[in-house]
């Protein structure tokens, strides 16, 4: 029964029809998402079309699946390739090239799936002489509660996905629960006009929040704002406005311990620091065309007792402890460097798969060349 | 049918492994010296550091306590008791945009809102000390007292600065030269 089941599964997925259908679905997905990217930007296109199992359409507030998403198609494609690979391709020296090429393709697609599911992208904007211990997400925001101690600061980072209206957030490190009264996924602030919660004041002035339309542009951020009430032992400690627009935290004191609350771009702290020693920007003489820009950084890792300088420039990123730092942009009269940070546990898979595919193709080519030369010699003889 | 059902169960089993979504709360511990400068061991009432801005305060302006994103606050008081207030506020982003802020100020002194098409008529662009300010000047009434607002906005990088003088019409009008000198004296990190 079980062996029959697996046989049926393998036969279904190894069928050429299955793979062709999956490829057609993928091509449709790529076509539609390419058109959508004009308005949605890369991040939201990926989130809508490629990251989920299904592309959904909201009907009365309920997401209804309307098309397979990139994740589903990718998984089924990998299953199909594996099923076809092991059921159709027998290992022989004559077929070794094709075998390796297909194996490389499976690894490549699986690697892109791992990257899609597990990679984290962020950015470090750092000025010359500045040292940073974190990178920031370009899209995601967090409600951060900083708890200063004598020698260290504990930070409780609450992702914005957990900030839903009427939700109550509890964490053992906090002496209060955070009740979300209102959440604005994108917002603007207005001073001197009391809002829905008139007791809330910023720096002694009334403030209100307008909801703003969500932006999907890659270079713009949705500024999250939220009204929260802090509750401790059944009593309210007050209502606060937290907003990505505010550059300073709201301070709550509980039993002589201050807690600093803020909504800010999500931070990814590292156990090492990065100092920008020098940023250089060369242009072609007589033009404004950039020729080269590079960042000389100093990495100080007291945890692993490693200290090193590194030069980051185009096609020459810094790889350190699972993160890769790419030179992305610059500003402030060439004193600010912006580094794109990628954390992808499967980063090596594209290189491995490319090497295997190249080896497979080379073997297949050489095998065919050998056959051709032998045939030619035979004909001459 | 049975085969289709079995294959579907197999696929769903594989897909269930992709259901994990890490939106959990995380806790970091960082050394004290690398924490945000806003984080202090104790809460004090001290004035926060200005965001790299400096100015020359005209004589006669009384400095008031600044806090939060109010970077500066001054009182202009005349001997007859009439007064005006000058505030300096910095917000990230465009803070709602110029039109919205103009209408907010107009609303504060009982004036009707304007539209985008009115902006060229009521907004004056003026370059002072190498920086371009957009300035509005209008008068209305607050509690039957003629009140004037003169406000200048300055976009600097990702931030918007608001320099606003609001108070009795006579005080604001007479303080215009000092307000202009104040704007001219503004510099950031030692330069414009």
Image (cartoon, rainbow, N blue to C red):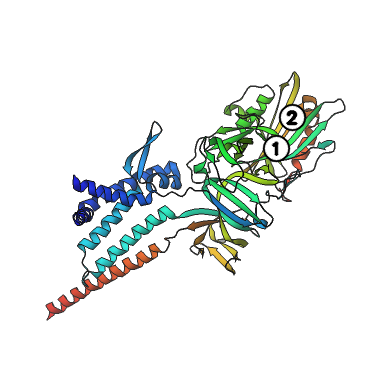
Number of labels in the image equals: 2
Left or right: B188, with A39 as reference point: right
Tag 1: Cα neighbours inside 10 Å, few (<14), some, or many (≥20)?
few
Specify the label residue A203 is tagged with: 1
In x, y percent, where is residue A211? 54, 33
x, y percent for residue A88: 20, 62
Name the outermost residue toward the top.
B144
Q: Nearer the viewer, residue B35 or A180?
A: A180
Q: Is residue A380 above or below residue A314?
A: below
Residue B166: numbered disc: 2
Residue A56 in sight in this render: yes
Name the one closer to the observer, A71 or A371.
Answer: A71
Mark 1 belongs to chain: A
Front-most of A237 and B126? A237
Image quarter of residue B186: top right
Residue at x-position 57% and y-position 48% = A172
Q: Position of residue A202 (x, y in %)?
A: 67, 36
Looking at the image, is A81 positioned above or below residue B23? below
Q: Extreme bottom residue here? A: A381
Q: Helix, strand or loop at disc 2? A: strand
Q: Does label 2 lie on the same chain as label 1? A: no
- Looking at the rendering, in which quadrant would you find the N terminus of chain A? bottom left
Which residue lies at the image location 23% right of the left edge and 59% below the top edge? A84
For residue B91, what is the image quadrant?
top right
């Amino acid at each position: 029964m079980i062996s029959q089941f697996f046989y049926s599964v393998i036969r279904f997925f190894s069928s050429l029809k299955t793979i062709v259908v999956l490829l057609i679905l993928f091509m449709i997905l790529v076509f539609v998402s390419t058109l959508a990217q004009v308005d949605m930007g890369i991040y939201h296109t990926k989130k809508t079309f490629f990251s989920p199992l299904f592309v959904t359409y909201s009907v009365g507030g309920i997401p209804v699946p309307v098309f397979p998403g990139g994740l589903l198609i990718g998984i089924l494609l990998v299953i199909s390739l594996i099923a076809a690979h092991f059921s159709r391709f027998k290992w022989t020296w004559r077929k070794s090239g094709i075998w390796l090429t297909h194996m490389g393709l499976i690894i490549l697609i699986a690697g892109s799936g791992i990257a899609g599911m597990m990679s984290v992208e962020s950015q470090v904007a750092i000025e010359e002489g500045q040292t940073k211990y974190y990178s920031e997400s370009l899209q995601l925001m967090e409600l951060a509660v900083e708890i200063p101690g004598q020698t260290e600061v504990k930070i409780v980072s609450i992702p914005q996905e957990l900030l839903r209206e009427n939700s109550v957030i509890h964490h053992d490190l906090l002496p209060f629960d955070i009740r979300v009264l209102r959440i604005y996924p994108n917002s603007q602030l207005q001073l001197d006009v009391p809002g829905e919660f008139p007791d809330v004041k910023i720096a002694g002035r009334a403030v209100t929040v307008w909801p703003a339309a969500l932006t999907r542009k890659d270079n713009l951020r949705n500024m999250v704002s939220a009204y929260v009430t802090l509750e401790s032992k059944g009593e309210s400690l007050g209502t606060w406005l937290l907003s990505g627009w505010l550059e300073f935290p709201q301070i709550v004191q509980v039993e002589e311990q201050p807690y600093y609350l803020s909504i800010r771009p999500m931070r990814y702290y590292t156990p090492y620091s990065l100092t920008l020693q020098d940023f250089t920007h060369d242009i072609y003489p007589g033009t404004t065309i950039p020729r080269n820009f590079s960042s000389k950084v100093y990495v100080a890792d007291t945890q692993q007792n490693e200290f090193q300088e590194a030069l980051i420039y185009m096609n020459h990123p810094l790889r350190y402890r699972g993160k890769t730092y790419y030179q992305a942009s610059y500003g402030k009269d060439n004193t600010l460097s912006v580094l794109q940070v990628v954390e992808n546990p499967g980063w090596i898979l594209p290189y491995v798969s490319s090497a295997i595919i190249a080896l497979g193709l080379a073997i297949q080519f050489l095998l065919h060349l050998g056959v051709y030369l032998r045939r030619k010699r035979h004909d001459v003889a | 049918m049975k085969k289709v059902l079995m294959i579907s169960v197999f696929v769903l089993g594989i897909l269930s492994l992709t259901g994990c979504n890490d939106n959990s709360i995380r806790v970091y511990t960082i050394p004290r010296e690398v924490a945000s400068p806003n984080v202090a061991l104790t809460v004090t009432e001290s004035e926060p550091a200005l965001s790299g801005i400096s100015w020359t305060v005209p004589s006669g302006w009384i400095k008031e306590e600044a806090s939060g994103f109010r970077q500066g606050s001054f009182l202009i008081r005349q001997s007859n008791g009439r007064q005006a207030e000058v505030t300096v506020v910095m917000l990230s982003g465009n803070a709602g945009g110029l039109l919205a802020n103009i209408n907010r100020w107009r609303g504060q002194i009982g004036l009707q809102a304007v539209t985008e098409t009115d902006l060229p008529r009521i907004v004056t662009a003026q370059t002072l000390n190498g920086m371009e300010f957009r300035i509005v000047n209008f008068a209305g009434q607050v509690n039957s007292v003629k009140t004037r607002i003169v406000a200048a906005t300055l976009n600097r990088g990702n931030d918007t600065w608001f320099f606003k003088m609001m108070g009795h019409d006579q005080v604001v009008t007479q303080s215009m030269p000092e307000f202009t000198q104040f704007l001219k004296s503004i510099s950031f990190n030692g330069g414009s």
